[in-house]
Image (cartoon, grey):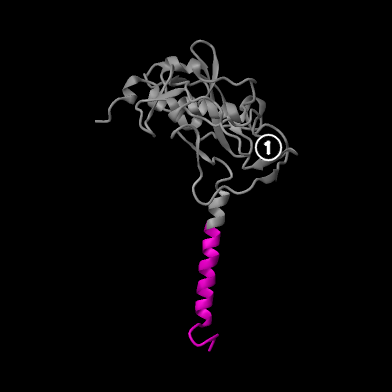
Amino acid sequence: MGTIVGSIDLAQVVLYAFWIFFAGLILYLRREDKREGYPLESDRGGRVAVQGFPAPPTPKAYRMSSGQTLYRPDRKADTRPVNAQPIARWPGAPLEPNGDPMLAAVGPGSYAERVDKPEMTAEGHPSIVPMRVEPAASVDPNDADPRGMAVVAADRNKAGVVVDLWIDRGEPQIRYIEVETNSGKRVLLPMVFALIDGFRKEVKVDAIMSNQFDNVPATATRDVVTKLEEDRIAAYFGAGLLYATPKRTGDIL
């Protein structure tokens, strides 16, 4: 029953067809995940493209809700100079940032050159905004409202005061805490780098020191943050996890 020829039956044909389909699926997915971020660049003798197998696919057009058409992959290389020097001459050696490591944009402080426009809602409005422009938003009464709390940095000194919260209109989440620093500058603190202590009435930040809050990249517009600004702000706090103090780059053992 079900025999096609003497030595091949229907079950074998189905099994082989599944193997071929699954291999093709893996190949397709590996090509598709290379639409962004490839080819990689190597430090072996200059800019050597590293793309692996399979090669990146041909460009595909993506029509955005704004009417803009994007092509991926776009084959545009990141031409920004690397603000660091290798600590040794062998390929792949770790990089030592030049100047202020918090602003060097390398290692944990690196960021992508995203478009300098805000994330938008389906209705065409900025998605991430402060609560002062979204009166319908509020903090759950069962949670601690950090507005008015002191911001305590990694050196256990006060860095400023929370003046507002930035929410995501598309999701019920607080994305940023707006801090007025000791000098009067207003900066955004990503929520993932903050710990709200409702008992002590303070917001704890272990990523950076109190005197480093004034150097947090600012937004160009008071009530709007662009995608590029978001990446730069997150990169600054990410850099602090390694570069905020010399001890953080010391030996592990």
- Where does the magenta region start and end? 1-26
Residue closer to the observer: 90 or 25: 90
Measuring from the top left, give residue 240's x and y in whole percent.
Answer: 42, 24
Q: Name, please, the residue furthest toward the left.
A: 253
Residue plotted at (34% across, 25% down) = 248
Q: Position of residue 53 (x, y in %)?
A: 50, 51
Q: Residue at x 63, y 20 (%)?
A: 220
Q: Is residue 192 magenta?
A: no
Residue ranking furthest to the front: 45
Residues packed near mark 1 inside 10 Å, few (<14), some (14 to 19) or many (20 plus): some
Quarter occupied by residue 79: top right
- Camera-nearest residue between 27 and 234: 27
In the rendered view, would you say 3 is above or below 159?
Answer: below
Mark 1 sits on what residue?
Answer: 121
**Principal SS element in the magenta part?**
helix
Residue 7 shows in this picture: yes
Residue type at numbered disc 1: Thr
Of 79 and 28, nearer the camera is: 79
In this rendering, position of residue 63 left or right of residue 203: right
Please tell me whether residue 26 is drawn above or below residue 150 in the rendered image.
below
- Residue 206, visible in the rendered structure: no
Vertical side of 218 occupied by 115: above or below: below
- Point 72% across, 35% down: residue: 124
